Amino acid sequence: MHQRKSKKVLIYFFLLFLVGSINNIELNNINFDKIKNIEIKGLEERNNLVLLKELKKLNLGNIFIINKTEISNQIKSNNLVEEFKVFKRYPSSLDIDIKKTKFLAKVNYRGKIMLIGSNGKLSSNDFSTNQLPFIFGKLDMFEFLKIKKTIDESRFSYDEIKNLFFFSSKRWDIELKNNVMIKLSKYHTKESLEIAFEFLHDSNFRDIKIIDARIKNQIITND
């Protein structure tokens, strides 16, 4: 009885091996189509086409073995991209949805006027952005994104700002569109913004043009 069971086990094992080998041969002989179509949405048409051209240079292979890292790195290298999602559309297509970066300011970078995106990257000034504030001083992207966040968290509207001035000490001055200049503290920037806001909305000080809020809990004016 024991010998019969052993023989049955050996026969089953042989059959499984044989069937598996046949299936592997069949799978190896199947040729999946390479990626034939890529559809990109989210950027202007000409920028979609530029990115599409770069993606087509990659060796994408078929939809089952595409190199996600390679595709991701290529998309991220485009300075206009804030976020993106890639969807597989079987049997041989990719759909890419892009969230375009929001332009926050203009800056003179190495002799050229460039646009600063909310993704922390610079783009060429090829867009209609006349209302964006201009940054004076040596650009420090980290410090700019930090002051932008601080302004957004204050009661000031970023749309009120005409120019930003950055100093080597990592301190900012802000010029509003009504030509009022606000000198901010390096160490308690948000607090100095709030006290400046209160001061600006005091009817007794409507003609003030310079608000110096560098000293904590104190305002110095110059009309």
Image (spheres, rainbow, N blue to C red):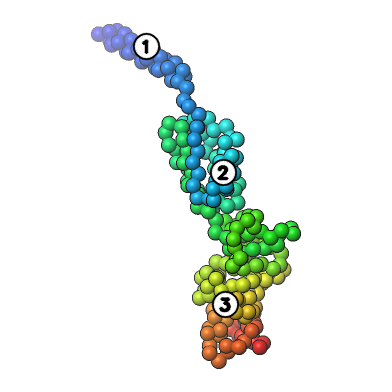
Three-letter amino acid code of the residue under disc 3: Leu
Name the mark on residue 49. Answer: 2
Residue at numbered disc 1: 14
Out of 78 and 5, give the one closest to the viewer. Answer: 78
Residue at numbered disc 3: 193
Image point 59% across, 44% down: which residue?
50
Image point 62% across, 68% down: which residue?
133
Task: Judge whether 104 appears above or below 184 on screen.
Answer: above
- Between label 3 and label 2, give the one nearer the viewer: 2
Q: Does the image show residue 181? A: yes
Q: Secondary structure at mark 1?
A: helix
Which one is earlier in the sequence, the residue at label 1 or at label 2? Answer: 1
Three-letter amino acid code of the residue under disc 1: Phe
Q: Secondary structure at mark 3?
A: helix
Name the mark on residue 141. Answer: none
Query: Are discs 3 and 2 less than 8 Å apart at CB?
Result: no
Q: How packed is label 1: few (under 14 Cα within 10 Å), some, or many (20 or more)?
A: few
**C-alpha distance separating marks 3 and 2:** 43 Å
* Quadrant of the snapshot with the C terminus: bottom right
Which one is earlier in the sequence, the residue at label 3 or at label 1? Answer: 1
Q: Secondary structure at mark 2?
A: helix
Total label count? Answer: 3
